[in-house]
């Protein structure tokens, strides 16, 4: 009997332990299941936000710039290479009409000079001799006039020979001609003949610029001898730059006077300049089988210098399409987007943290208003890309956009990265 009682007691203990273990296991299973439900990897994947908010400091730090959608002709165009040229009547070699030694140079390379400005001074003893002869010419002419008058009186009294009268007349005329010649020479030297006196003889001549422009070359130096065939400096007036495009024969029928040309400098394609066709050549240039098309530069001319190589796009038809800079377009998941300035606010669940107040904390509306003023919101808009030329791309927006809407023209990549980083779930 005692043995049976012991066996029954052990069986009751085992049943109790089994029951408790099952409940613990079920409880653990339930806890694990709830934890799995709360795990971030078990929820539905959230969609990425479409509106990003940046402060002015953030925009300045990453170099974000704003602009507008521009209408450009990128489809019906002719591409041609060329160079910037200044017409010869806007270039000048500054020379002296008289030979001499350079005494001073008043300009340097790159200096802007006005028309009539003194470029250099030269010296020559011959200048003094011409002024001296001019001063003595008046007394010689006076003597010649007196001799002529005496011969006339002798001839009237039949006391003088006619030959002497004729010789006196010829001598006076020669003196008058010589004085007129000296007067012109002195004027060409830049000296006023009426200002010449025995105590005011000038040994140096002023060499002045015949046009206004920039000094592009210097040929002389102090102490060197120059003459009429030796220029002192070269001056170019870049304000009258024009573009010489080399257009091939097959494209020549499409060229017309008045067409607009957009061109960029070969070494700086980021800046686009504008020109207009004013003349089309009538002969081929050397052996290239191309014709020179001359265009006048209009608008901005900053940074343009004679001789620069350019790449031009000539508009054939007036077919305009909305375009944006290439840097304004970002690609994500095989689609293309631009960022448009908007007044919409981003959702709190997509990167904007909700502002919680602790018990007793006051809400500062002024601080929040200042923070809002220093921010700009940008909406991600899908577009379809078209042809790309001259750093611009034609686009077609999937939604209607206002004509004067502001877009991000540079730094769109950083805004897209901000959206990508805040669109997912944070653990």
Image (cartoon, rainbow, N blue to C red):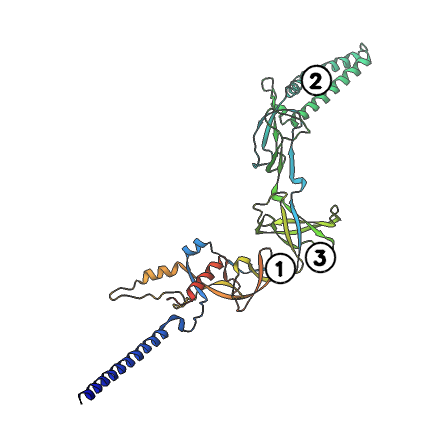
Would you place residue 365 above or below residue 238 in this image?
below
Between 14 and 35, the one nearer to me in the picture: 14
The image shows residue 335 at horizontal and vertical percentages of 53, 66
Q: What element carries label 3?
A: helix
Neighbour tally class for label 1: few under 14, some 14-19, many 20 plus, Cα within 10 Å: many
Residue 254: numbered disc: 3
- Which of the two marks, 2 or 1, is nearer to us in this view? 1
According to the image, label 2 marks what residue? 141
The image shows residue 36 at horizontal and vertical percentages of 36, 74
Residue 74: numbered disc: 1
Quadrant in which the C terminus is drawn:
bottom left
Would you place residue 161 above or below residue 227 in this image?
above
Between 418 and 282, the one nearer to me in the picture: 418
Quadrant in which the N terminus is drawn:
bottom left
- Which of the two marks, 2 or 3, is nearer to us in this view? 3
Query: Real-space Cα distance between discs 2 and 1?
Result: 78 Å
Between 176 and 15, the one nearer to me in the picture: 15
Q: Disc 2 or 1, which lies upstream in sequence?
A: 1
Q: Disc 2 or 3, which lies upstream in sequence?
A: 2
Q: Disc 1 or 3, which lies upstream in sequence?
A: 1
The image shows residue 90 at horizontal and vertical percentages of 65, 40
């Amino acid at each position: 009997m005692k043995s049976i009682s012991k066996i029954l007691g052990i069986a009751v203990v085992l049943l109790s332990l089994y029951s408790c273990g099952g409940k613990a296991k079920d409880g653990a299973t339930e806890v694990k299941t709830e934890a799995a439900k709360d795990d971030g990897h078990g929820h539905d994947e959230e969609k990425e936000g479409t509106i990003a908010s940046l402060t002015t400091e953030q925009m300045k730090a990453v170099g974000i710039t704003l602009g507008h959608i521009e209408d450009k002709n990128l489809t019906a165009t002719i591409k041609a290479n060329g160079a910037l040229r200044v017409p010869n009547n806007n270039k000048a070699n500054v020379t002296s009409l008289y030979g001499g030694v350079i005494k001073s140079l008043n300009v340097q390379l790159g200096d802007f000079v006005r028309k009539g400005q003194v470029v250099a001074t030269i010296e020559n003893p011959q200048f003094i001799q011409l002024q001296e002869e001019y001063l003595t010419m008046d007394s010689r002419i006076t003597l010649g006039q007196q001799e002529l008058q005496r011969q006339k009186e002798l001839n009237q009294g039949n006391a003088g020979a006619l030959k002497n009268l004729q010789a006196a007349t010829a001598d006076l005329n020669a003196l008058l001609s010589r004085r007129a010649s000296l007067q012109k020479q002195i004027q060409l030297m830049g000296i006023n003949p009426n200002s010449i006196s025995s105590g005011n003889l000038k040994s140096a001549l002023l060499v002045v610029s015949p046009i206004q422009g920039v000094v592009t070359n210097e040929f002389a130096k102090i102490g060197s001898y120059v003459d009429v065939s030796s220029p002192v400096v070269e001056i170019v007036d870049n304000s009258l730059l024009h573009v010489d495009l080399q257009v091939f024969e097959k494209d020549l029928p499409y060229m017309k006077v008045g067409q607009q040309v957009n061109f960029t400098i070969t070494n700086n394609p980021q800046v686009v300049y504008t020109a207009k066709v004013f003349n089309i050549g009538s002969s081929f240039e050397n052996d290239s089988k191309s014709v020179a098309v001359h265009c006048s530069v209009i608008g901005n001319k900053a940074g343009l210098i004679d001789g620069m190589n350019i790449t031009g796009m000539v508009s054939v038809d007036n077919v305009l399409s909305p375009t944006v800079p290439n840097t304004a377009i970002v690609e994500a998941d095989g689609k293309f987007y631009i960022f448009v300035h908007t007044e919409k606010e981003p959702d709190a669940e997509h990167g904007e943290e909700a502002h919680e107040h602790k018990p007793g904390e006051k809400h500062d509306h002024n601080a929040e208003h200042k923070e809002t003023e220093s921010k700009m919101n940008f909406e991600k808009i899908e577009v379809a890309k078209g042809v790309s030329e001259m750093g611009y791309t034609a686009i077609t927006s999937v939604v209607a956009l206002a004509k004067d809407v502001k877009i991000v023209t540079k730094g769109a990549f950083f805004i897209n990265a901000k959206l990508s980083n805040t669109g997912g779930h944070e653990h």
